[in-house]
Amino acid sequence: MTTNWQTLGRGMVDVVFPPNCVHCQGLVEGSPYRHLCAACARKIEVVKAPHCTTCGHPFYGEVVGERSCPHCQSLAPAYREGRTAVLLKGPARALVHELKYHRGMHVLADMTAIFARCPGLLAWVRGATLVPVPLHTRRERERGYNQSVLLAEGLAQAAGGGTTVARLLHRVVDTVSQTHHDKKTRMANLKNAFALAAGGAITAGQHHILIDDVFTTGSTLNSCALVLRRAGCLNLDVLTFGHG
């Protein structure tokens, strides 16, 4: 009942004071999301099959043979499958930037709703242990939160069915920002950057899914996956909100 009253109250507030779209700054009216207007909501490109089995990027047209896209062929993933919810452009990128750089935790509900719109994604996640990619302690302290933890928690709640979040990894090296580096430099920067968290316990047969906001080159996710593999994680996949 409390949730229903909260939903009603939020709806009334939105009618009187419509929120602004995080992408175009227009008023949000008639949209399935609270922080994207209807026009920007239509620009969200949810990923559907067929897609690359390493990074989740969609294939277009008929697919024959290998299911890995060209820029993933040199990655040698330490995980089984990689999936992503959306392509990171336009409004989707604005949501990530709002969360990551502007303390915009209010967009988490929209990002979780987008996860839910990705065909079969909640069923794939349900019952798994979600492992957020860690931030270094200094960076998390400065930001006030780890966006990957928040995404994992929202996703676990949406999926239900015993889906849990476990912070099994620790970032031991405070690496420089990876945003403007190529794959080779990223891999060098991330060597030995992650370790199993103190008290982190791996159940070999349990389905573990690494969670991050963005898949760019896959270097960060693969470095995390290698640590989990060495700790005995045999059933390991990767999921990101966006690709790009």
Image (cartoon, rainbow, N blue to C red):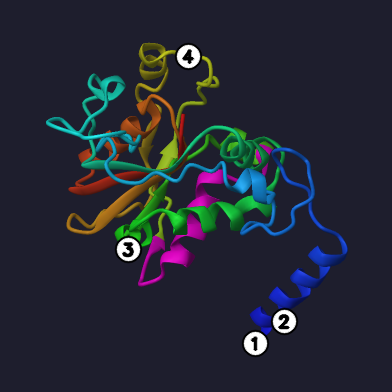
Magenta range: 143-164
Asked if the residue at tag 1 contacts the one at tag 3, i.e. Cβ–Cβ closer than 8 Å, the answer is no
CA distance for labels 2 and 3: 29 Å
Residue indicated by mark 1: 1
CA distance for labels 3 and 1: 27 Å
Q: Position of residue 101 (x, y in %)?
A: 67, 35
CA distance for labels 2 and 4: 47 Å
Q: Relative to residue 117, is residue 227 drawn left or right?
A: left
Residue 244 lies within the magenta run: no
Residue indicated by mark 4: 181
CA distance for labels 1 and 2: 6 Å
Q: Where is residue 54 in the image (x, y as percent from the top left)?
A: 27, 34
Q: Which of 180 and 46 is in front in this view?
A: 46
Would you call the spot at circle 3 few (<14 residues within 10 Å), some (14-19), or many (20 or more)? few
Residue indicated by mark 3: 123
Which of discs 2 and 4 lies nearer the camera? The answer is: 2
Residue indicated by mark 2: 5
Which label belongs to residue 88?
none
Which of discs 3 and 4 lies nearer the camera? The answer is: 3
Would you call the spot at circle 4 few (<14 residues within 10 Å), some (14-19), or many (20 or more)? few
Question: Judging from the image, what secondary structure is the residue with disc 1 in?
Answer: loop
Q: Position of residue 56 (x, y in %)?
A: 33, 38
* Callout 3 amino acid: Ala
